[in-house]
């Protein structure tokens, strides 16, 4: 889940218009950019799609951290292709957000000055090669839980972007699992790296779904608008139920002593993550928050002359071309 | 070391080292479109590395693989030209470096498609399509950045001035080149200088950039005699896992 704790914006439009809008959503119609929409719906979507896009872009960094150290040519190519896909996802999502009247540059400025957030998970460091497995397996795995239902979200451009993204994400998850497989089949050091990666990423992955719904005040409106499709707790449970057997298959131990199968509910019982840590990370105090934003800021500043030159060249070229067609 | 093995290492190491430099941009390029394009180029080059070094390992017949050659050799066994190992510095240098390389690589690979060695011809046939696309993009970007603003023009000129003394090595024929030419495996690099020069002149002129006067050329990359200090740092990063855990399978 790359969008967390999306606050729903209040909306003050005419009740009849709102009712008609809601009826379209209830009937399963897609809302398109030129359709009328409540201001709250538009603003909430900008926040959600923007946060999702930022998560893809900042999400390039923890995995990008290992591209130059990938252990074989094949792994290097796979990882590079994966991180490139994330840049592509960012691009589709910024384009989807642009249809709501906000530019990519505006969104980027909001990310850099802290007005917009990205998923808490990317504020954790990647410390060994096994983290490339754990991130694909757990982080992309968690993202898929949320994104598959979002293919049916009410806003057309977002839903369509999600269709393309989901195809690639499930490939990434398998790729991550394969990295983990090689590690657990490997040497003692490799197994140790694999277990260490699971130990560090398990709870941050559970946090990706956001706090429990009973503490979430915005879920109801967002679910009515079909911006949010499932509750945080439903998705977290689904993730645990699917992931625990995979960990067992890998011969790894989920770092939760309370974990057990509940025959009655047909689900695993599991320990909640430390939510105080989650709120610290969201407030900017995660292990990598400052470094991640500094890296993005540095890239943005260092690229300014290139972006300006591209625009200047395009303008000059247009001027030259228009002069040359005159009689 | 056989001359063919030496020749194949040169091809593979150029692709590996330049591909690695391009991959360093992933996540931090000036715009998303550039990030994606640089990753594409890096991916093509890593793919070419697998082919060249894979064949090199076969020719050597010493039980090594493409990965062994990439991750277990030290700097003095690398045979890439110096131009591809210098650090990125800024986006301008990266694109200028890519362009100077592509401008050679397109006619070079085109010639190799007619190689007397069928494996070389096959690898070249696959790679030349990618190289043509790389050249189209790097030349257009050099023109855009040269033409763009006063700042971008100055940065591109700085990049060109820095890289220029490294370009001469591309065309300095040596014993390996002579042997490959004699066997019909590859033309002499010097025979492609004129074609390269033509592409350079056309592009620099459209980019409003000035070709440096100096004809001085650094050397030592293709022979492995004297790489820059930068290569060792690149390899220290690139090879860390294979060196630290030599018995691991990844």
Image: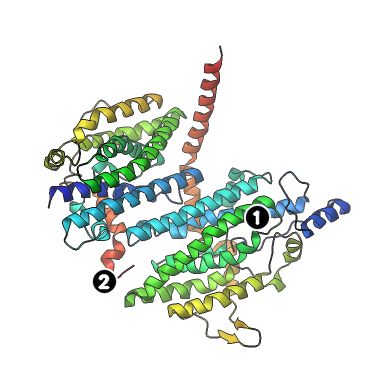
- Whole-percent x, y for residue A239 in the image: 58, 73
Give the percent coordinates (x, y) of residue A264: 65, 88
Q: Residue at x 13, y 47 (%)?
A: B3
For this view, does A78 lie left or right of residue A204?
Answer: left
Label 1: element kind: helix
Query: Depth-wise, is mark 2 or mark 1 nearer the camera?
Result: 1
Q: Quadrant of residue A212?
A: bottom right
Residue drawn 58% across the image and 53% down it: A53
Residue B88 in view: yes
Q: Is residue A41 above or below residue B187?
A: below
Query: Crowdedness of circle 1 by 10 Å Cα count: few (<14), some, many (20+)?
Result: many
Q: Nearer the viewer, residue A47 or B12?
A: B12
Q: Mark 2 highlights which residue?
A: B247
What element does badge 2 sit on? loop
Q: Nearer the viewer, residue B42 or A207?
A: B42
Which of the numbered marks, if any, corresponds to residue A327? none
The vertical placement of A205 against B199, above or below, is below
Same subunit, tags 2 and 1: no
Q: Position of residue A12 (x, y in %)?
A: 83, 52
Image-based side of B12 in relation to A120, left or right:
left
Toward the viewer: A250 or A197? A250
Report the front residue among B191 and A308.
B191
Residue at point 19% right, 46% down?
B7
* Location of the C terminus of chain B (image quadrant): bottom left
Q: Residue at x 30, y 62 (%)?
A: B240
Which residue in the structure is indicated by mark 1? Answer: A159
Give the letter of the chain under mark 1.
A
């Amino acid at each position: 889940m790359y969008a967390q704790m999306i606050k729903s914006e209040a909306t003050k439009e005419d009740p009849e218009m709102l009712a008609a809008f809601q009826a379209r959503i209830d009937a399963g119609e897609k809302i398109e950019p030129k359709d009328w929409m409540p201001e709250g719906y538009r603003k909430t979507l900008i926040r959600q799609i923007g946060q999702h896009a930022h998560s893809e872009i900042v999400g390039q960094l923890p995995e990008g951290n290992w591209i130059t150290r990938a252990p074989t040519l094949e792994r290097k190519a796979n990882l590079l292709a994966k991180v490139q896909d994330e840049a592509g996802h960012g691009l589709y999502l910024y384009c989807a957000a642009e249809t709501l009247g906000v530019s990519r540059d505006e969104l980027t400025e909001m990310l850099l000055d802290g007005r917009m957030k990205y998923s808490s998970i990317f504020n954790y460091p990647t410390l060994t090669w096994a983290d490339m497995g754990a991130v694909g397996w757990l982080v992309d795995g968690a993202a898929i839980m949320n994104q598959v239902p979002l293919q049916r979200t009410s806003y057309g451009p977002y839903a369509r972007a999600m269709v393309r993204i989901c195809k690639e994400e499930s490939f990434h998850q398998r790729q991550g699992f394969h990295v983990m497989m090689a590690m657990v089949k490997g040497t003692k050091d490799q197994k140790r790296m694999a277990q260490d990666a699971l130990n560090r990423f398990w709870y941050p992955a559970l946090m990706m779904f956001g706090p429990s719904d009973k503490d979430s005040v915005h879920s109801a409106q967002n679910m009515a608008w079909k911006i949010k499709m499932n509750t945080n707790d439903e998705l977290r449970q689904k993730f645990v139920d699917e992931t625990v057997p995979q960990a067992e298959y890998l011969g790894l131990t989920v770092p939760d002593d309370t974990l057990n199968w509940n025959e009655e509910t047909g689900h695993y019982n599991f320990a909640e993550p430390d939510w105080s840590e989650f709120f610290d990370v969201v407030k900017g105090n995660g292990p990598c928050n400052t470094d991640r934003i500094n890296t993005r800021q540095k890239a943005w500043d260092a690229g300014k002359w290139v972006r300006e030159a591209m625009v200047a060249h395009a303008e000059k070229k247009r001027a030259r071309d228009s002069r040359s067609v005159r009689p | 070391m056989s001359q063919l093995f030496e020749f194949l290492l040169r091809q593979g190491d150029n692709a590996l080292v330049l591909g690695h430099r391009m991959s360093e941009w992933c996540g931090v390029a000036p715009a998303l479109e550039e990030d994606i394009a640089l990753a594409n180029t890096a991916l093509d080059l890593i793919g070419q590395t697998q082919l060249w070094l894979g064949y090199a390992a076969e020719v050597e017949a010493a039980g090594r693989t493409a990965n062994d050659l990439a991750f277990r050799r030290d700097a003095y066994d690398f045979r890439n030209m110096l131009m591809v190992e210098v650090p990125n510095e800024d986006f301008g240098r990266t694109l200028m470096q890519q362009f100077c390389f592509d401008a050679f690589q397109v006619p070079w690979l085109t010639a190799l498609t007619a190689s007397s060695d069928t494996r070389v011809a096959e690898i070249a046939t696959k790679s030349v399509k990618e190289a043509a696309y790389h050249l189209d993009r790097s030349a257009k970007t050099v023109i855009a950045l040269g033409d763009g603003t006063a700042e971008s023009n100055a940065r591109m000129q700085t990049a060109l001035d820095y890289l220029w003394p490294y370009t001469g090595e591309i065309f300095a024929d040596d014993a390996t080149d002579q042997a490959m030419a004699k066997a019909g495996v590859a033309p002499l690099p010097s025979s492609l200088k004129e074609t390269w020069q033509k592409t350079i002149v056309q592009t620099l002129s459209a980019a409003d950039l000035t070709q440096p006067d100096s004809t001085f050329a650094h050397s030592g990359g293709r022979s492995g005699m004297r790489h820059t200090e930068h290569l060792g740092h690149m390899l220290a990063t690139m090879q860390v896992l294979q060196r630290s855990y030599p018995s691991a399978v990844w």
